[in-house]
Image: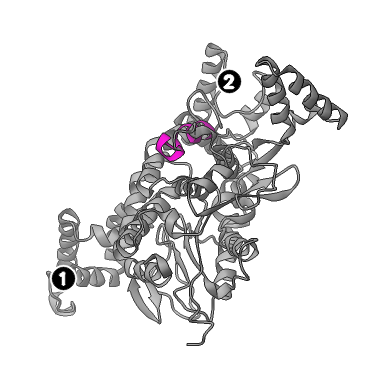
Amino acid sequence: MTEQQKATTKFRILSLDGGGMRGVASAKILEEVEKIIQEECSITKLNEYFDLIVGTSTGSILAAGIAGNRTAKELLDLYKENGKNIFLPSVRKLRKAKFKLTKSNSNSSEIKFSNSSFLGLQNIVISLLKSFQTKKYPIGVQGDKFSADFWENLLFGIPLYPHKSGSKGLAKVLQKKLFTHEQGKNKQVNKLTMCDIKKLNKADLLIPAYDVYSRNTTWFANDDETEWYYKSIKLWEICTASSSAPLLFPPYKMRYTKNEIRLFQFCILAFLRGAQTFAICLLSVMLWLNWDASNKGKQYLPHIDGGVSLADPELAGIAYAVSRKDSDDLKIEEIAILCIGTGRSTRPYKHKEMKKWKIQDFVQNILTIFLYPSTENSGYISHRMFLGMDKKKRLRLDFELNKQLKGEPKEGVLRQRLSKKYSYNEYIWEDLKSQPDIEKKIDKLYDELKQEKKAKYLKKINEKNYNQKITELEKNKKFNKKLLKIKKEAKVSEEIDDYKISKELEYAAKCYLKYGKIKVDNKDTPVTSVIRDFIKSNAGSLS
């Protein structure tokens, strides 16, 4: 191994992907990483091991929480307990109704109402009637009360989850729950800023969000003390901006206010407390500098999900590391990076079905298809950058949410697609198939196979070995289909706005950690062993 390959790690990066409620999977994996760090190093928290934590979308929430001294378990509980307060059931029901109604009538020029479209229309009408009774429009519908915008959005638009709705909504939950008083060290926790995070721990924090007014990505970071724009903006607001995914949330209004606003407020406070001469002098200087307080105080920049420009932020983390003022000419081979995904949606689509898609079909699939390539691209570029170096310098932890293709890969042969209703999570299935009720179902199927085929035509197997039974069932087309009906009990919902999936996502991540394998030197190595090796190899003086 060359000197470049053996380079000592001087900078450690934790990169966290976006993915809505699927952040539960990331949090569960982080819990295991945190546990291994505690076992292998003389530290207890993730922000003591990593030098930079970068996250986008739901990853920004995890990144900010970790940087703010929260444990992985606390962040996991944040998702499990508050998912329904972010992705409100009432809005989700209305969204589903709109999608059903649109989809049912998209394949015909005539207006026809199937059962699903009728239910969709019924839900919309019920929501509308309630709005008349309460004199409030349905939550998630944009526009002023009963204005033209309101009617247009209700009838033709897509209901969006609100940032604030009473004590609920993405912004409200983050404002109240992202940090606790202990993390804030007696400071009002909903007022923590990037500057405060820098004081709490050694780790830097980087969160991207896309500014749709300036049409560029804002890199919210705590390394540049001269950056005035967002230093006074609360961290929960930055996370709200980075998590405001198009088609799910409206853009978040980020204040664009220079520090003079604080000076103006300080003048008023000084005047009221008796320091009139000082206040008048300071105000006079500000007026002499021709500062317009009223105009500056009303500026906003609308931001949307950072995943629009960077769903996997690892490249941003690497660029940040080598460009810091105190980087001391840090080299790429001196960086170690751990990337954690939120589970991959890998449903294959055929040409004959996609060529029939209408606008609403593309809209519904934007988040699962069209934003995913940026994650793949970032991962591939990063992978290429680390080729030839120590293989323990970069580790990506992610898994396929549901198996979508039949059989094993063969060169030059496209595998057939599994029916959507038969797709399943292979790691959950690995855990389920050893449970008594599943074993009984497999036994019953295998007995049916033996009765249908003469015993002499069946391969002799150890009937206590359920893996062998499953293999024999999979060889028979008829019984493989019956087996798939059992396997679908291991299916995981892939919807990023479904708050009910937190338990199954946590279970899926747990099974991935238990049964998952990663190729290391062409050998399948258990996920947890690879994590441990990464942590130990890059600990340096921390171990």
Main SS category, magenta section: helix
Q: How many labels does the image show?
A: 2
Where is residue 172? Give x, y as percent: 51, 30
Q: Nearer the viewer, residue 129 or 305?
A: 305
Left or right: residue 525 versus residue 22 is left
Q: What residue type is labelled 2?
A: Tyr
Query: Is residue 189 shown in magenta?
Result: no
Q: Which mark is residue 410?
A: none
Residue wearing tag 1? 465
The answer to whether 93 is drawn above or below residue 166 in the figure is below
- Identify which residue is drawn at 44% across, 41% down: 498
Left or right: residue 99 versus residue 450 is right
Where is residue 6? Give x, y as percent: 48, 81
Residue wearing tag 2? 137
Classify mark 1: residues with Cα within 10 Å, few (<14), some (14-19) or many (20+): few
N-terminal label among 1 and 2: 2
* Mark 1–mark 2 distance (CA, rounded to whole Å): 59 Å
Q: In which quarter of the image is residue 239?
A: top right
Q: Nearer the viewer, residue 259 or 368?
A: 259
Q: Quadrant of the C terminus?
A: bottom left
In the image, the segment drawn in magenta is: 171-184
Closer to the eye: label 1 or 2? 2
Where is residue 17? Give x, y as percent: 51, 55
Assign a secondary structure to mark 2. Answer: loop
